[in-house]
Amino acid sequence: MDSGAGESSAADDYESLMSTTDAELLKRSWRNEKAAPEILKFDADLVQRSRQQIQLMEEMVDEFGKNGVDPLTVSLYQMDLDRTMFLLRSYLRTRLQKIEKYVFHIQKTAEVWNRLSRQEQKFARRCAGDIKHHLEQSVLTKLPDQYQSHLRQSAASEDDDMVPVPQLDAYVVCRSKRYLGAFQLDDGSEEPVNIEADDLYALPYKSIKPLVESKQIDLV
C-alpha cells in the first residue's frame, strides 16, 4: 500500500472530524459542567464522537511516526490529541466528583437521575451503597435508634436534611454568543437583564438554568 495515499486518507478523515467542531463543543460542555453547581445532562453523542476522534488521532500520530512525517507536523497533531484527551477526561471526572458529592440527592430525584449515563448510574449506586455501609459501620449503629438514618438527623426530621444539595441560587459568570434581549430573572428583581452578545454577566444560576440547558448561554 502506498504510504502517501495512507497519510492522505488519514489526514482527510481527521480534517472531516475536526470540521464538525466537536473539540469546541467538548470544551463548551466541559466549561458548563465545571461552572454549574449541579450536574448537567450527559452528552452521550458528543462523548462518543470525541472518543472516535481520539482513536483516529492516535492512529494518525502512530502512522506519521512510522512513515517519517515531519516531526513538527506530528507534534501539532499530538497537541490536538492531548488537548482532546484532557477535555474529555476532565469533563468525565468533574461529573463523577459531582455524583460523589450529591449522590443521595441525585438518586432520589428522577429528573436529575436521568441526566446520568448508564455507567454513571452504575457508579452512583455503588457509591451510595459504599457511603451508607461506611456510615453504618463506623457511626450510625453506635447511636440511638432515632439517629441511625444516613439521610436524616433524627426520626423527627420531616425531610432528608443530611443530604447535600446543589446551591442553585449561586451566582455564575455566563456569556451568550448572540443577542437575547430582555430576560427577566426569577430572583424578585423588577428590572429585566438585557443580554447582549459576547458580554459577561454574573447571574443566579437558577434564573438562567433554562438558557444553559437550551444552549443559549455558556458558563465561563
Image (cartoon, grey):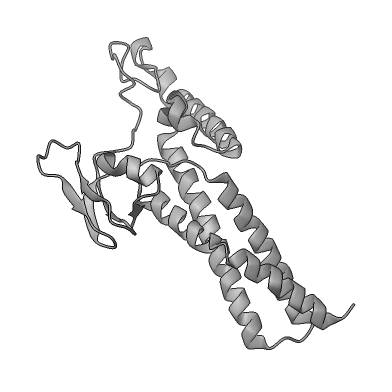
Judge whether 131 appears above or below 143 on screen: below
Q: Position of residue 154 (x, y in %)?
A: 31, 15
Residue at the far right in the pictured view:
1
198, 109: nearer the viewer: 198
| Screen quadrant of the C terminus | bottom left
- Left or right: 108 as drawn, with respect to 205: right
The residue located at (58%, 66%) in the rendering is: 19
Q: Is residue 97 above or below residue 159?
A: below
Q: Position of residue 107 (x, y in %)?
A: 47, 27
In the foreground, 163 or 202: 202
Q: Nearer the viewer, residue 5 or 63?
A: 5
**Would you identify the image quadrant in which residue 3 lies?**
bottom right
Q: How many marks?
A: 0
In the rendered image of this protein, does residue 141 appear above or below residue 41?
A: above
Name which quarter of the figure residue 2 lies in.
Answer: bottom right
| Residue lying at 39% horizontally and 52% vertically, measured from the top left | 32
Q: Where is residue 168? Give x, y as percent.
A: 28, 38
The N terminus sits in image quarter: bottom right
Q: Nearer the viewer, residue 5 or 48?
A: 5
**Residue 63 visible within the image:** no
For the point 19% across and 41% down, which residue is it? 184
* Left/right of residue 208 with respect to residue 191 in the rendered view: right
Left or right placement of residue 200 versus residue 134 in this view: left
Can residue 203 be seen at all in this image of the molecule? yes
Report x, y in % for residue 42.
51, 43
